[in-house]
Image: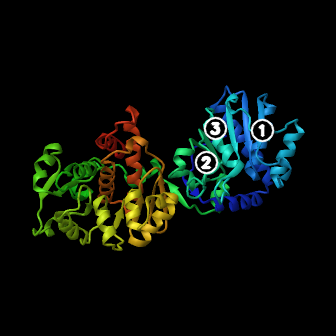
Amino acid sequence: MATSLPQSFYRAEQVREGEQAVARALSIPLYQLMLRAGQSVFDCINQHYPNAARLLIVCGAGNNAGDGYVIARLAKSAGLNVTVWSLVTPNKLEGDAATAWQEWQDCGGSYVEHPPTISQFDVVVDAILGTGLSRAVEGTFAQAISAINLADVPVVAVDIPSGLCANSGCVKGAAIDADMTVTLIALKQGLLTGQAVSYRGKLLFAGLNVATAFSRQCTPAGYLVCDDWIEQYLPKRARSAHKGQFGRVLCLGGDQGMAGAVTLSAQAALRAGAGLVKVVTQKAHTLMLVTRQPELMTQDWAPGQSLSETLAWATHLVIGPGLGQSAWSDALWTIAVSARTPKVIDADGLNKLARQPQHRDDWILTPHPGEAARLLGCDTKDVELDRFAAVKAIHTRYGGVAVLKGAGTIVYDGTNYAVANVGNPGMASGGMGDVLSGVIGSLLAQGVDLFPAAALGCYLHGKAGDKAAEAGERGLLASDLLPYLQQLVD
């Protein structure tokens, strides 16, 4: 039966190799794992679609097809009306998949070669392609995927939606648009980010009673951020606590017409628990800032004025929200980025960094895919083709901790990957990134190191967005997150 998602994730090749190693170590035949996989997926179908009476199971080649034949046999034994649509001649199957096909035959099962009327079924099971996909889907397989996607029938994917790359999450030509994915033995990193988030549907996990042994043998590729991180990095404060213990965040930005961005960042820093927050911005914005949030300190600045005392006051910097591209912003950027103070770089700060690259170990960079493309000198589509590779490339070129925002935000520090498996489409609106930069700056100010501050900040930001979206996703505002941030860090 499916359980909650594990906190570790892996590359596809790690899972394939680790599965065999664990089976040997536990003296479990690999076919026994296939039987467990089929049973787990069938159990999920029964749980989530209890009224389904007619199943279409679409099988390709390899072990994914073998899982499909096991599911077909179990469903038939349970009295369901089962049709198997095989995209390859089953007698070409080998190993455990061939055994599963033979057992399906032995119980009176058969298959069809030509596309059935998909709309007559209650559930479609995708057992076409597994995690070993290395090239674009085409021909009969692509046609079958298209037909399944066009039908108005729930789809359950076995291990991964066919056509998705298990490592990058990108679509290889065509991919199943699943309503539910039951991933097996270990969590594949490609299911967590980018295009995969739109194709996987509800993500469930079945460890097949070997997940614990697997995790002991295999080093994770990375980790999912979870609620445990909040307790670990933001413990309850002592009753004697005072504001001086929780840092001083300095937010720099807000060029003409863009005061809202730096305001949101500073407000988020306050709501996430920073002791003191000050904003350096255009003179015209200072009254608006304190009117909007009287707890903020402000300082107007013009080129030629000194910022040395203000920079010395700050324990951490947030540079970029609403910074703009003017002479004023260029001058402010030059002074702020040279400070030897841990910092978060966002928005126009990232655009300036792309034009004048530097490598530092004391910063967190928080680009969205468009900003990431400018940092790497490539197209946005190249970033989205492999988000794990892109965030690694940003770190390699610029140092520090790199955050690649988007569906399934990824954080990387040169050694560790973390993914924030939270957030929703309502967060695709102006100001959300400004709130995130303030949250991360606040965590740094409260003593959290760069990597966990970036990862936990992304998690808190996405989770606050999910709570705010309970009232509706469309029309969600960045400022709607602020009260939920306070609840989450308490």
The kind of residue tagged 1 is Val
Look at 44% across and 71% down and name the residue there.
Answer: 396
Q: Nearer the viewer, residue 283 or 26?
A: 283
Disc 1 residue crowd, few under 14, some 14–19, many 20+, Cα 10 Å: many
* Mark positioned earlier in the residue sequence (3 or 2): 3
Secondary structure found at label 2 = loop
CA distance separating discs 3 and 2: 12 Å
Question: Which one is in front in this view, the residue at disc 3 or the one at disc 2?
Answer: 2
Residue 105 is at least partly visible in this image: yes
Which labelled disc corresponds to residue 175? 2
Residue placed furthest toward the top: 51
Question: Are dots 3 and 2 in contact, CB under 8 Å?
Answer: no
* Above/below status of 71 relative to 231: above
- Residue 349 is situated, as x and y percent measured from the top left of the image, at 28, 63
Which labelled disc corresponds to residue 84? 1
Which residue lies under the disc numbered 3?
155
The kind of residue tagged 2 is Ala
Secondary structure found at label 3 = strand
- Relative to 346, is 99 on the left or the right? right
